Image (cartoon, coloured by chain):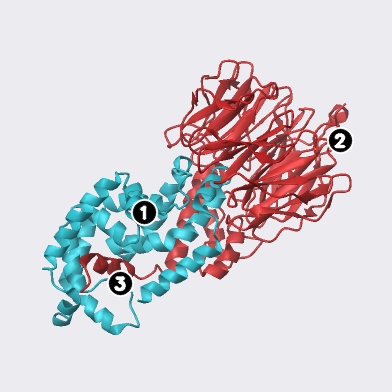
Chain colours: A cyan, B red
Amino acid sequence: MTNTGRQAADAADADLDAGDDAALIARSLHAPECFGVLFDRHAPAIGRYIARRLGPDAADDLVAETFLAAFRRRDHYDLTHGDARPWLYGIATRLIGRHRRQEVRFFRAIARTGVDPAAEAVTDQVIDRIAAQGARRELAAALARLSQDQRDVLLLVASGLGYEETALALAVPAGTVSSRLVRARRKIREALGGQDPTRLGEDAP
Amino acid sequence: MIDEMEQLEQLCAAVASPDRQRLTAARAQLSTAIRRETAGHAARRPRLAVSLALRHRRPSRRWLGWAAPLAAAAAVTGIILGSQGVFSPVHRPVPSSSTHDPGPGLAHPATAYVAGQSGTVTPILTATGTALKPIRIGIEYGQISSAIVFRPDGKTAYVLSSTVLGGGSGTVTPIRTATNTALKPIAVGQDPRALAITPDGTTIYVTNYQSGTVTPIRTATNTALAPIRVGGNPWAIAIAPDGKTAYVADTQSGTVTPIRTATNTALAPIRVGRNPLAIAITPNGKTAYVLNNGSGTVTPIRTATSTALAPIRVPAGSFSMAITPDGRTIYVLDLGSSQAQEGMVIPIGTATNTALRSIPIGHAWPSTMNIAITPDSKTAYVANASTGTITPIRTATDTALTRIRLADGAGPIAITPDGRTAYVIAGSGPGRPGTVIPIRTATNQVLRAITVSNLPSVIAITPAPRR
């Protein structure tokens, strides 16, 4: 629930500088210095996404790399998309793809130890946290077994992108996103044994 | 019981936000990398750039360059910013390779106006190459002046300003050129992007990107009239030489909407291509050319019938263009989309509507390029911000002449009405004023740099008085 609070705060922040990304990117064609604003808007979310998949340490480097790659492609940005998130998530996803083995190792380690280096250190919802602990191990183990394509779709959608946005990010048709998602979800469900993971968590603290 | 998708959402949402220090470090890393690529001449001293930035970690107005206005926002959003500019090259005093001597024949009454993020406009007397006292134009901190137009009689300059961050309303500030005094800013719509003035000087039209409108301003009274709805995200605007029609390009729908200036009504939109970013109209008013950045095309529009003709292929990603005053050639600018490619100028012959052989101007990617053409249409000056060079192009043959190297970067250009001098905005480093470099067009000789207010982003010169 703390996440909802943070998302609300993020949304409020976004309202403060409501100019759309497309405008900013187009302006940065003439005035490259404007591109920095895009970082300020989206780096926290992109950072969390990368940290989720590769761990917080790798996230630091890849965030800067993502935005630099974006900067270099800014003259090819489709200005009809006011929201640059799918584009940025797509770039981040491609960079993550270069560290495939690291990602698998990362999820396996979480599955093995139950310690998630990317997770928030403190939450006020202690019970939620404990309940989530067990589920996290199962989830991490299942994620480690997915194909890269499936992980991409699953984690982009789980990070808050819609199907259309995910399709945009991965440059695949929306139908492909749906079918990959169905298969990936089935695998996860099977891995979790169709059980209620919150209850599962109580057994495995 | 919650399903596996909700669990995954929780797993993703429960990720700790990157802490401020790490974010600042990433931002600094990005800034350094971008700067290294956008200001080729500054790359020689990257270490100095970093150490300067570290020393001046505390955001200050003087030091921040483009990040300065962001700092204001950061105070609200809680994001700490790296205190580095992107476009700002490391400071180096501009060597005065020659003394600026306009000579008796060079004197003309034109004044250049330079504006940017300083909240001021600096007038430069082009006869002597001297800057006058900057004029405060009543814009807020965090805003950028991005365009200037003049009444044809040169008596008033109009400066368009909006927020650097995008969003928010903008203003147009009139400046009386005889006294260099700013009048009260005129409020326009949300996130204004471009402006154009009718040839008779009676009306200015401002595109409001976020509002999806165009604001007319009556120059006799300096008042805004009711905004005209065009929809989408209007950006580029151009007015036909007869003053009867304004053409507004909508980046959202890929259309151009003609506006009848007599009644200020929007006519039926004309479909062009994706991401239309620039419009140029031939001096005879017969054809409006629209550059579609997304499609990689230039669409000619027959203005008499408002019909789009067959698009002309240019590289996708082309983002800017200019037409020669004689209307013979359009020059399209393309950064080149990888390190392997050079920035290109693509000439389009308007007689045949065909793209001619591209002219390379050195590695421009991923920074930016600017263009200005002499009034006699003989030379196009193309600035490459990446290499800090100006490439003069002889338009008769579309050949590049010897590149002019500037010590401090090469940004937007303006040329005096007599065609004798080109003024180029050079880099503006943190904590120091901006510079404008005059170039004598007859010899392409670089003259002494002129100091202006910091972070300049636009330059325009008063028109020649009509006879």
Q: Residue B26 appears in which quarter of the rendering?
A: bottom left
Q: Residue at x 44, y 59 (%)?
A: A42
Question: Mark 1 belongs to which subunit?
Answer: A
Residue B215 shown left or right of residue B85 in the figure? right
Disc 3 is placed on an element classified as loop
Q: Residue at x 52, y 61 (%)?
A: B82
Label 3 to label 2, Cα distance in Å? 66 Å
The answer to whether dots 3 and 2 both sit on one chain is no
Measured as percent of width and height from the top left, residue B344 is found at 52, 29
Q: Point out which mark residue B109 bears.
A: 2
The front one of B19 and B225 is B225
- Type of the residue with mark 1: Tyr
Residue linked to disc 1: A89
Label 1 to label 2, Cα distance in Å? 53 Å
Disc 1 is placed on an element classified as helix
Measured as percent of width and height from the top left, residue B309 is found at 53, 23
Residue B99 visible? The answer is yes
Measured as percent of width and height from the top left, residue A176 is found at 25, 46
Question: Mark 2 belongs to which subunit?
Answer: B
Residue B194 shown left or right of residue B25 in the figure? right
Residue linked to disc 3: A119
